[in-house]
């Protein structure tokens, strides 16, 4: 039994995964078809790359010395051993556009290279979506400081203009553009879930308070599939006595603008969250366990986050801060565990100590994987790849690296703090009949809260012993 299975109110995560897998399978049929002519799609893609290319991008595109260090750092190359998955190859088309359209030597490149066609973007689709989680491991080892992950992101924006977004992401992008949420989630679903949690688990969730110190975000996965995530969050917040709320006009962590490359949608999703946080005068906004939401909200340059009157914090950061201050006291977790850092919050966000502080507060026997923290291998499911049917083989093969890494620790469980990682781990666990448990940090924390009676008993036992 999972260490977090303390309530029977909602299905287990294994069942959640099965249910979502069915829903994901239907997304391909819901994807919109291209609406523009081929000429317009090509022009849109090229214009997007020209517009996105500033000094940093130009230097990155000019400075590769073909040393190959990024190649061995990429989990897709490592697992497939095919040169086409080398990170530097993912930039070839962007570089060609740059060289022909804006580089100082463009007159020369126009003489010696072929004009870019829409079919070039079609061919690049696998490299830009299926085989890059924008995990940044290649970026970290590049001696020239080339941020391949960011360049891939610009390519995703070009793919949006070329109407070449993979069908699953295209369907969810459309849903979020028109409904503001995904997977059929909505403010009504949020209210329904809050009522269910109150009635069946006896836990209160403050919805739409006029003011609160902490505004908590949820996610579509929590609202339509995994109620345990929101239940765990509520238990912790209430236990800590936090003045908190969820806002029905700004609750969705997931951002399919970021995942697809649609910068307009990215901002459209982030703006209501910022407006809601300002209205309730929140000092802190806590992002649910949703890895890509971290860069979508915290690092979004369009938000000018330095000027925001509140702090954007990931769930693991919030929990870690509470554990470090001694406010979050937890029962012992009597098992050997390892922690998988989500790439977006770890390598690209720097939140390494906080989740470990929470596990330390549980007195867990934490064993690090051979490649950990900055060097942690991506699980292969981030940046929307978990949803892509065409990426199944790449994802499954690269996950075998993760299985080897976790097995080397001898841990019984691997703890994750990102719904995408968790779904990908659950998929890998079921497909490989892997004997490890996959735990969510927030659910594990909620399952180990020391309640008031236990705390009082411990204090009086301590007093009697003195
Ligand atoms: S590590 Fe950097 S310089 Fe070396 S091949 Fe990769 S992108 Fe080029
Ligand atoms: S960002 Fe990650 S997935 Fe993408 S090329 Fe680099 S190492 Fe590979």
Image (spheres, rainbow, N blue to C red):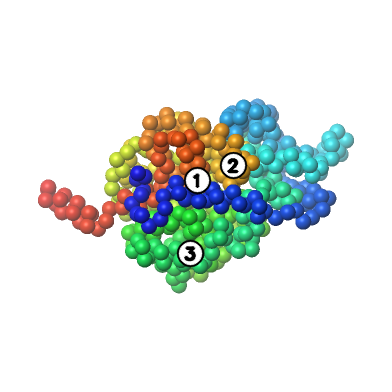
Mark 1 or 3, nearer chain start: 3
Q: From the viewer's perspective, is residue 421 above or below residue 211?
A: above
Q: Residues within 10 Å of mark 2 (few under 14, many from 20)?
A: many
Q: Residue furthest right?
A: 111
Q: Is residue 364 left or right of residue 318?
A: left
Ligand 2 - quadrant of the structure image: top right
**Discs 2, 3 touching: Cβ within 8 Å:** no
Helix, strand or loop status at disc 3:
helix
Give the spatial CA distance, label 1 vs label 3: 21 Å
Q: Which residue is mark 1?
A: 423
Can you tell me whether the CB of the residue at mark 3 lies under 8 Å from the nearest atom of ligand 2? no
**Discs 1, 3 touching: Cβ within 8 Å:** no
Residue 435 at what x, y percent from top left? 41, 35
Q: Which residue is mark 2?
A: 133
Residue 257 at what x, y percent from top left? 63, 54
Q: Nearer the viewer, residue 264 or 334?
A: 334
Helix, strand or loop status at disc 1:
helix
Q: Could you tell me if residue 414 is visible in this image? A: yes
Q: Which residue is mark 3?
A: 190
């Amino acid at each position: 039994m999972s260490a977090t299975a303390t309530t029977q109110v909602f299905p287990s995560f294994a069942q959640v995964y099965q249910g979502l897998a069915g829903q994901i399978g239907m997304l391909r049929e819901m994807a919109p078809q291209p609406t523009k002519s081929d000429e317009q799609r090509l022009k849109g893609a090229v214009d997007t790359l020209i517009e996105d290319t500033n000094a940093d991008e130009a230097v990155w595109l000019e400075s590769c010395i073909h040393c190959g260090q990024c190649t061995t750092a990429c989990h897709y190359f490592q697992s497939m051993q095919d040169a086409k998955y080398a990170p530097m190859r993912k930039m070839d088309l962007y570089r060609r556009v740059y060289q022909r359209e804006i580089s100082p030597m463009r007159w020369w490149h126009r003489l010696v290279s072929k004009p870019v066609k829409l079919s070039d973007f079609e061919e690049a689709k696998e490299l830009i979506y299926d085989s890059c989680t924008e995990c940044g491991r290649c970026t970290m080892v590049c001696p020239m400081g080339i941020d391949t992950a960011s360049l891939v992101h610009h390519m995703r924006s070009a793919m949006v203009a070329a109407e070449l977004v993979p069908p699953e992401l295209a369907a969810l992008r459309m849903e979020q553009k028109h409904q503001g949420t995904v997977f059929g989630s909505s403010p009504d679903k949020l209210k329904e879930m809050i009522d269910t949690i109150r009635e069946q688990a006896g836990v209160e969730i403050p919805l739409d308070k006029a003011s609160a110190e902490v505004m908590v975000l949820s996610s579509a996965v929590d609202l339509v599939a995994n109620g345990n995530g929101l239940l765990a969050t509520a238990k912790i917040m209430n236990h800590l006595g936090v003045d908190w709320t969820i806002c029905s006009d700004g609750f969705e962590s997931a951002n399919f603008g970021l995942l697809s490359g649609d910068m307009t949608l990215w901002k459209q999703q982030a703006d209501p969250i910022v407006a809601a946080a300002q209205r309730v005068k929140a000092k802190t906004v806590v992002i649910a366990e949703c890895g890509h939401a971290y860069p979508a909200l915290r690092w979004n340059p369009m938000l000018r986050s330095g000027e925001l009157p509140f702090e954007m914090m990931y769930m693991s950061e919030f929990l870690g801060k509470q554990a470090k201050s001694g406010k979050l006291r937890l029962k012992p977790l009597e098992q050997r565990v390892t922690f998988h850092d989500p790439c977006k919050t770890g390598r690209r966000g720097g939140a390494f100590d906080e989740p470990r502080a929470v596990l330390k507060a549980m007195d867990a026997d934490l064993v690090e994987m051979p490649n950990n923290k900055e060097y942690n291998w991506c699980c292969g499911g981030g940046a929307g790849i978990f949803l892509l049917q065409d990426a199944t083989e790449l994802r499954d093969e690269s996950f075998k690296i993760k299985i080897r890494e976790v097995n080397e620790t001898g841990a019984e469980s691997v703890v994750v703090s990102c719904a995408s990682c968790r779904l990908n781990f659950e998929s890998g666990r079921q497909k490989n009949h892997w004997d490890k448990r996959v735990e969510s940090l927030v659910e594990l924390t909620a399952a180990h809260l020391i309640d008031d009676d236990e705390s009082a008993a411990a204090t009086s036992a301590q007093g009697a012993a003195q």
